[in-house]
Image: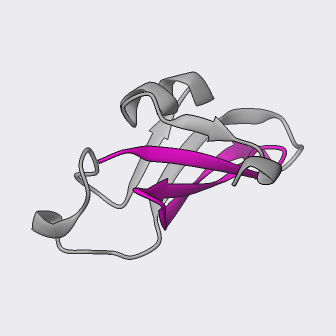
Amino acid sequence: MTYTLHRLAPGSYDLALDGVIVGGVVRETTAGGAPTGWCAELLQDLPAATRPRPFDCVEHRFQTLEAAVAWLGGAAILDSAEA
């Protein structure tokens, strides 16, 4: 299984697994706009046994985008033009 992140806008990515969009990775901010971290989230709330690895719940939070990318097995980040 290979994850890729497809940049949509600053701080927003589609999350694809083997070429199929399964979720998103977004930068989270405070009400004032200060960044607080990143969230990787599946589009569907699948039963735990059928969620793609490494998801053991629907949402996972990270301090940095780099930490999320590492957790996703070193997912490649692609610009819209590369998708």
Q: Is residue 7 magenta?
A: yes
Q: Position of residue 9 (x, y in %)?
A: 84, 52
Residue closest to the far left: 49
Tell me the residue at 79%/53% (across/down): 80
Tell me the residue at 23%/63% (across/down): 51
> In the rendered view, does 48 fall on the left or right side of 11?
left
> In the rendered view, does 16 fall on the left or right side of 6?
left
Image label count = 0
- Please tell me whether residue 19 is drawn above or below residue 12 in the rendered image: below
Tell me the residue at 28%/51% (across/down): 55
Q: Quadrant of the C terminus?
A: bottom right
Q: Position of residue 23 (x, y in %)?
A: 50, 63
Tell me the residue at 16%/65% (across/down): 48
In the foreground, 48 or 33 = 48
Q: Position of residue 81 (x, y in %)?
A: 82, 51
- Please tell me whether residue 62 is drawn above or below residue 21 in the rendered image: above
The residue segment tinted magenta is 1-30
In the foreground, 14 or 42 = 14
Q: Is residue 24 magenta?
A: yes
In the foreground, 1 or 39 = 1
Residue 65 occupies quadrant: top right
> In the rendered view, does 72 fall on the left or right side of 39?
left
Q: Is residue 64 visible?
A: no
